Each structure stands twice: as structure tokens, then as C-alpha cells.
Amino acid sequence: MALLIHGIDSRKALVGLREADPHFLMVAAGLTALSLACGGAGWGLLVRNGFQARWSTLGAWYAEGIFAGQVLPTGIGGDIVRGVEVARAAGAPVAVACVAGS
């Protein structure tokens, strides 16, 4: 991440952002939000099949998993985070949740 941020010319990025069509930026932000909401709802339905949790809690866990998936240098980091959160709430062993989450 540091190399990526370091390699970006901030002036060019700001110029590009200023020249971008605001309508397209709003559509992109809306589609991103819709994608996250649909992904969270799908994951939440799977979790709620055997475990009762509030949608706001499931949404927070899903967001933590998305963040971990973007930051950690692995493809399953977000799955593990979500699995650990569910395991803690359900009282299951965390090791089982890590395997099941991936």
C-alpha cells in the first residue's frame, strides 16, 4: 500500500478527480454501496440460517471483513475475520470458525 501511495502523483490525481464527471462519480459510489449492501445481505442470510444476530452487527462484521481483505496480503483475510467474529458471538472455538470462514 505504501509503495502504491508513494508512486501516485497527487497533483495528477487531483486534476483527474476535478475533471471527472460528478454524475459518474455518484453512480460509481452508489453502485459500490449497492454491491457492499448486497454482499453483506447475502453473507448475513447465510449466517442467520443457524445463528441469530442483528443486521447492524452482521453489517459491521462484513465491513470489517472487507477492510481486512483489502489490507491483509492474503485472499482469505476477510473470511477469517468474519469467521472469528461469528465464532466469538456464538461461543464456538475460533479455530473452527477460521476453517469454516475460509
Image: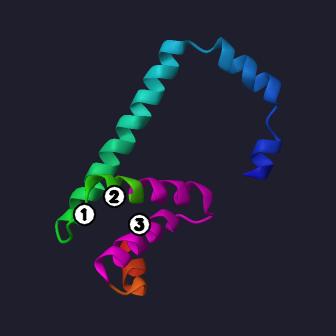
Determine crowd level at label 1: few under 14, some 14-19, many 20+ residues with C-alpha closer than 10 A. some
- Mark 2 nearby-residue class (10 Å; few <14, some 14–19, many ≥20): few
Measure the alpha-carbon separation of dots 3 and 1: 13 Å
Q: Where is residue 99 in the image (x, y as percent from the top left)?
A: 40, 80
Q: Mark 3 against mark 2, which lies toward the viewer?
A: 2
Q: Which of the two discs, 3 and 2, labels the residue nearer the N terminus?
A: 2
Q: Which residue does the numbered mark 2 point to in the structure image?
A: 57
Name the mark nearer the viewer: 3 or 1: 1
The Cα–Cα distance between marks 1 and 2, rounded to whole angstroms, is 7 Å
Residue 28: x %, y % from top left: 47, 27
Q: In the image, is 56 to the left or to the right of 94?
A: left
Which stretch is magenta? 62-91
Check if residue 84 falls in the magenta segment: yes
The residue that label 1 is drawn on is: 53
* Residue drawn at 40 percent across, 70 percent down: 85
Nearest to the observer: residue 62 or residue 99: 62
The amino acid type found where label 1 is placed reads: Ala
Residue 72 in view in this figure: yes
* Amino acid at pointer 3: Arg
